[in-house]
Amino acid sequence: MPKRKLKTPESTETTKICKKNDNFSDFWSEKLDEIGSAHLADTKSRTKSAVKHELTGIGSSSIYKGTRDLQLPKSEDLSNFGWNEGVLEHLQVLLEEIEVDEKKEEQIEAERGAILKFTAEYRDLLAITGDQGGYRSIYCAHIIQHLIRNKNLIIGNKRKLEIASTQEGGADEETIESCRDSGFVRPVVLVLCAFKKDAYDIINRLRRILHGDDEGKSEVWNKNRFEEEYSGPTELPTTRADFPDDHKELLLGNNDDAFRIGLAISKKVLKLYEKFEKADILVCSPLGLRMILNGDDGNEAHLISSINMTIVDRTDIMLQQNWENLQLIFSHLHSQPSKIDVDISRVRKLYLDGQSRHFSQLLMFSRYSHELFTSLMLQNSQNHRGLVIAKPKQSGTLSNIEIPLCQELHKFEVKDPNETSDLRFKYFVDKIMPSLIPRTLIVIPSYFDFVRVRNHLKKAEESFVMCHEYATRAKVDRAREMFFHERKSYLVVTERWYFFNRRHLTGVHRVVFYQLPSHPLFYSEFINMSDAETSQRFLAVLLLCKYDRIRLENTFGTEMAAAVMSNKQAVQAIVSQ
Amino acid sequence: MSDSSSSDGEDNQKFLGNRKKNLTKKKVVTEEIEKDDEEDVKEKSFAELGVSQPLCDACQRLGWMKPSKIQQAALPHALQGKDVIGLAETGSGKTGAFAIPVLQSLLDHPQAFFCLVLTPTRELAFQIGQQFEALGSGIGLIAAVIVGGVDMAAQAMALARRPHIIVATPGRLVDHLENTKGFNLKALKFLIMDEADRILNMDFEVELDKILKVIPRERRTYLFSATMTKKVSKLERASLRDPARVSVSSRYKTVDNLKQHYIFVPNKYKETYLVYLLNEHAGNSAIVFCATCATTMQIAVMLRQLGMQAVPLHGQMSQEKRLGSLNKFKSKAREILVCTDVAARGLDIPHVDMVINYDMPSQSKDYVHRVGRTARAGRSGIAITVVTQYDVEAYQKIEANLGKKLDEYKCVENEVMVLVERTQEATENARIEMKEMDEKKKSGKKRRQNDDFGDTEESGGRFKMGIKSMGGRGGSGGGRGGKKKKMSK
């Protein structure tokens, strides 16, 4: 394949003409008053004033203004970021070695360019992309660049203070105030990812950005322990050969979801397993970090009181873990610390004034959009540099359906979003349950909805069995068997159970989607499980309301979703040949 | 007995409430009193005292229309750059007396950690902090209050803002000097010790010593105290350089021969007036006569709470303990002897400067014996009898037997009243301490020798540590085990 290069200056003349940007200094030097702070915290007002733009690379996006207008991307080269040359060079190497489908090459180049720009400019960003290696390399480079600038600043100020203190009268007020460069605690970067294998990949990218590929030059402390604890199998079990690609990906590597590790960088040395008090970067799973915030393993929330940069990598997988852990972590970010162990004369005024949430960048990456991702971003993005939420046009996954199908779409009316659950349940009980037939699979994505429906089915003494994430393997197998042999009429499954097990369900003649799955592929996969006679048309029943728009777009594609939503009929039928 | 000189006209001095109807109006002789500062005769405005215009405006804004007495006395010296030691009580306006010079100097040389104010209690620290902020609100002043009972991290954040003024209780400040990185007072320009007698009496000596060691010697220091104790005097010698001394109270410099007086006071404020009298004559030896052993002990302990050098002497004490107290008094290690008539009878008690009849003697001959302890062998002395509304008849009998009317001792009422709160606090603490002694006595110590009350000095020392644990300092001060080292003379 031909090598792909990021844009570089065509000539030295061009380089000289380009204006040098200093995003790091711009980020920290903003003077924020109460009006600016109130504006950034006003989610409703910012949502109303958000501007829709089609951004090259990341698609249709909502742009939420910070304290200044956000410059839309132009075709600029990397030298305008003012980054360290070594960082840029090593980033190029990482990006080049990723295999990319030739047909998608141009799109991915544009996507990486956009992500790089917004990241380097310290914007908050929610990006929808499958280019995992690409965006990871970019944010790892940004982290290293940020830490290089930060450490140089601290070292420079320290030297400045030492010189001033030897002079008569010691350091003056102006000098002391100008040397404020730190937060309450040392950790400044927080990376949240789902599994140890993700941490393994991210940390190796950080190492390569820092050191390049010359093994002789790099020094990594506790490398052997890291290899032992974070690496995992690279061979796929043969029994899983026919599973979908994303499930195979799930099985490879170390998929432990309870971990936390501190990294420190000092004079080109990368220290792994550094104590959090002395770490610069924390790489954690939501569960692993949550346990030390106010859980069984401690009350150390002060350790994330001064985070400048939070990266949430693969929120789509975290959705299948425990979303509440993520919310709890965010509630502790930027809280006033219960313990301060740094030189207080070096603490930036903005931390003392409770403004740290406005000087913190938030990056979120996912394979697909979800209402919870948007909500988490909007609730926590108060960066004075603004926010971009990308929602690229979706082609949907209906083309994966392999059987003749009739899709029956039931739209129920919702005026208050808080009533959505109740109204969905009422619609299901009143309109769907009376016409259920044996051999019906009922898919309920949310466990809480599942509990409600299960209790109702029990009370009504319906004939059903269940597959959910808390059921034992034996119970699940028995349930599947009873359903297959028609000793039970209905099989009720949750999305999370299916995500982690991806088992083929046999004996399905009809499927009811209580709600569309979050994962775009699941809709077609459940439908393709049909065992109906080829002469009959398979029926899929789907409940939806206007707040399911994002899920509908993911599965049906943006255009068809718009058509379905604008159709006035309460029940729509879509028949495929 | 010497005849007192008479002055022209009558002086019907008013004080709390009217006198009992039974008492007839009588002539009162006005003593000629030396004044510490003759210039105070004429009141001056803040501007005339040398206060700069922005601060005069600030005082006006706060409703401080005229300088108080202590401000009149202290401001000229302070504004000239002298150290100041002031004898003044709460409510006398001493906060303004030290805040104004500090702010005036701060305006000339703006700087973080410019001034440290040490106070004995959290409440006082908050008050002073508020007054600084009120005075300095127009000039961008930042003040931080650092006291126990408040979250250490929140205070560290306040210190991280590098305030101009720190108002602190000594214990918590030491915690931050030792534990909060990046915080030091190497550039401090002003040290204020407010209510220094209470700071020293509340077991903050170790903390105060630590603070004095880490702040610059080159600084200006103001010390204010309601009472002048030996500890305060020692602190003054160690910390202030050639200070100007100011006082809001007038006092006798010398006493010519024996003077006999009475004061007529509400029974409710009896202890307060006693403290006032002893404070007026601080540095002089005194005997305080009480009617009962219990009163004797309580008064002695209460006076010790206030930092005064008092020892008890009463009939229920063992002979050994009585001799111990007497010897301390004789050797002038203790200035005040609190005793009953019976205990004092037959003892060779040396000349004392002052006798106070806290409780009325039951017989005239006891009165004569009591006051005979002073003004002996040609030396001067004063005797004051405390008369409450319940003592009027007994007092009149004594006057009748003496064959003459005594002169009323003139008290400055508002100066007495500012001592009320402190005295009540000390009285309550004394009651607690005596209850502890009593319980210890009941706990079944068999030997008779131990049935006596313990040496009040030791028990007082133990109790002081108890006060600390009862929230005197509060917060996480860290454990301080072991005995407190006695201060060597």
Image (spheres, rainbow, N blue to C red):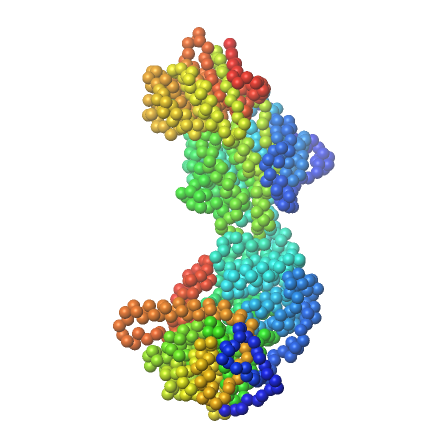
Give the quadrant of the N terminus of chain A.
Answer: top right
In this rendering, would A181 be left or right of A222? right
Q: Residue at x 41, y 25 (%)?
A: A453
Q: Residue at x 46, y 36 (%)?
A: A324
Rendering coords of residue B201 (x, y %): 47, 70
Q: For residue A82, what is the image quadrant? A: top right
From the viewer's perspective, is residue A390 above or below residue B489? Answer: above
In this rendering, would B227 be left or right of B102? left
In this rendering, would A447 be left or right of A190? left
Rendering coords of residue A78 (x, y %): 64, 34
Q: Residue furthest front?
A: B21
Rendering coords of residue A380 (x, y %): 55, 38
Q: Residue at x 53, y 73 (%)?
A: B17
Q: Nearer the viewer, residue A335 or A44?
A: A44
Q: Residue furthest top?
A: A535
Q: Nearer the viewer, residue B153 or B15?
A: B15
Q: Residue at x 47, y 34 (%)?
A: A323
From the viewer's perspective, is residue A92 above or below residue B58? Answer: above
Q: Residue furthest left?
A: B446
Can residue A307 be seen? Answer: yes
